[in-house]
Amino acid sequence: MNIVEIINKKRENKKLSKEELAFAFNGYLEESVKDYQMSSLLMAICINGMSDEEIFNLVDIFIKSGDVLDLSEIPGIKVDKHSTGGVGDKVTLIVGPIVASLGVPVPKMSGRGLGHTGGTIDKLESIPGFNVNLEEKEFINQVKKIGLAVTGQTKNLCPMDKVIYALRDVTGTVASIPLIAVSIMSKKIAGGADKILLDVKLGDGALMKTREDAKKLADIMERIGKFYGKEVMCEITDMNTPLGDNIGNALEVMEAMDILKGKECFLRDLCVDEASKMVSMSKGISVYAAKEEVLETLNSGKAYDKFLEFVKYQGGDITKLSVSNHVMDIKSTKKGIISKIKALNFGILSVTLGAGRVNKEDKIDYGVGIVIKKHLNESVNIGDTLCTLYVKDLNININPNDYFEII
């Protein structure tokens, strides 16, 4: 078997056998297949797609590249959630504490930023001292004690995905439905949760730009779940506008805390919806009944207290969370109504500022980012502040019309 022949076969849009997929992907993990060769194969997959059989086989290869967590010693029905990524998506930081505060165990393995989309692990690492590399026993014990743990992929859990994930991020091979499905579902299945809620983002700032593609991704992930005997619920949510006001790692943690403390906004409504579905799945109650529990724990402050407990358990010092001292206001050059806030452009801007990665070796600046001050359908005048940038230095020029449409 030859890696070049395998690349050529997929380039010609032919189906790869499980043996061929194993040869290529296991070879990359073992470093006999080079970066440039795997990049070529990933690009061929991006262009030509994969059959269900290829996808199921590749999920199996990813899972078997490492360990599968056994969470049976954690009592209760364990529910995981995953978002396909977007701009300003800090839902896990809000939903996890809400659900855990209601007695539903949430064992969560998360990833780093991918392309223009932020990563939960990067956001948590903006909290000084926060440990995102829990050992398996630590992870299980923490979920047993407080109902919630969030960690990066352990060294032995889907190591295949870890190396492919990093390569996709810097080779223009992020937006592939089969590769997204394989990445998400291999981790979710290996992660050991009983039930999984998947949030498929749709729109300008998402990996899925059309409803058709979002539906395709949701359907294939549900089929993978069924193949592995896992209950998977998918919902498709909007990402044409950044999710919340803050974009950037420490800034997003701050906004998550504000929402847990009572800030009213669209993002809060989305988190209530997702938390209600997770509680419903675990407790076997209606979504309506679950929503009543979710609102009670939010309004009472119990969910916020769970967030603080969670951060403390993983070594974080929330009092030392900080953002850049260099601040720039971006002002409107037009008078009118805001008709669009361009999520993708804001995602790219956040990476440019240093909140994400261009190369897989890049270090993130946790304190930079953007705070949006004006919202859809709001009136603005010339000179009004549209957003505030937190930057490394002030030597940056921004055209507000690249980020806001004003009519």
Image (cartoon, helix red, strand yellow):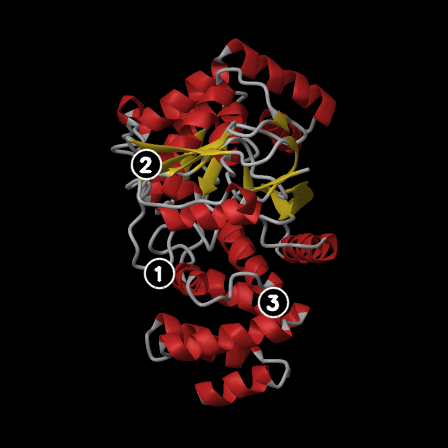
| Mark seen at residue 359 | 1
| Comparing labels 3 and 1, the label whose residue is closer to the camera | 1
Q: Is residue 167 above or below residue 289?
A: below
The x, y position of residue 244, in whole percent, is 54, 32
Q: Is residue 12 above or below residue 104?
A: below
| Mark seen at residue 160 | none
Can residue 73 be seen? Answer: yes
Residue ID for mark 3: 55
> Closer to the N terminus: mark 2 or mark 1?
1
The local secondary structure at tag 3 comes to helix
> Which quadrant is home to the C terminus?
top right
The x, y position of residue 208, in whole percent, is 63, 54
Give the amino acid at mark 1. Answer: Asn
The local secondary structure at tag 2 comes to loop
Residue ID for mark 2: 367
> Which residue is drawn at the image coordinates 47% and 78% (left, top)?
40
> Which is more toward the observer, 24 or 335?
335
Quote the CA–CA distance across marks 3 and 1: 27 Å
Give the amino acid at mark 2. Answer: Gly
> Which residue is drawn at the image coordinates 51% and 66% (left, top)?
173
> Which is more toward the observer, 395 or 283?
395
> Which residue is drawn at the image coordinates 41% and 56% (left, top)?
67
